[in-house]
Image (spheres, grey):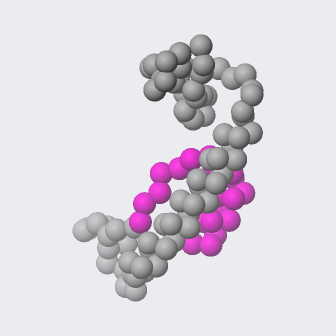
Amino acid sequence: FEATMELVRQVGYASAFSFKYSPRPGTPGADMPDHVPETVKDERLQRLQALLLKQQQDFGSSLVGSTIDTLIEKPGRQAGQKVGRSPWLQPVIVDE
């Protein structure tokens, strides 16, 4: 797990889908002994997602005030705003 955390730091992922492992019948992992306890899985998932959230926030903050290509998708929540996606699929709010 610590190697995974270090890789996430080195790569600098701004987002990632992360889930706890759960065995699936018929897969090699399902039959392996000594599964990680649920409490440990929960703690590790929380740590990983906290790191990913911080990296996502840092990445977003680094782009504030920048001009980037954006695909506008829909009106924003507030009048005069539009919401789109950056080339990195981050949400972008644009004031008209």
**Is residue 63 shown in magenta?**
no
Q: Is residue 23 visible?
A: yes
Asked whether 47 or 21 is in front, the reply is: 47
- 53 or 87, which is in the foreground? 53
> What residue span does the magenta drawing correspond to?
1-20
Examine the rendered structure and indicate whether residue 88 appears above or below residue 1.
above
Residue 25 % position (x, y): 25, 68
Outermost residue toward the front in this view = 79
User: Residue at horizontal 59%, vertical 55%?
Assistant: 52
Instruction: Give the vertical position of 4 relative to 74 (above or below).
Output: below
For image coordinates 72% across by 57% down, the residue present is 10
Q: Is residue 86 rendered to the left or right of residue 21?
A: right
Quadrant including the N terminus: bottom right
Residue sticking out furthest to the bottom? 34
Toward which corner of the image does residue 96 lie, by quadrant? top right
The location of residue 84, given as percent across then percent down, is 53, 24
- Residue 16 percent coordinates (x, y): 53, 50
Residue 93: name its quadrant.
top right
Q: Residue at x 43, y 60 (%)?
A: 19
Please say whether residue 28 is visible from this viewpoint: no
Give left or right: position of 9 versus 95.
right
Q: Position of residue 33 (x, y in %)?
A: 37, 85
Residue 14 within the magenta-colored segment of the rendering: yes
Q: Residue at x 72, y 22 (%)?
A: 67
Nearest to the observer: residue 79 or residue 32:
79
Q: How many marks?
A: 0
Judge whether 95 appears above or below 56 on screen.
above
| Residue found at the very far top of the displayed protein | 96
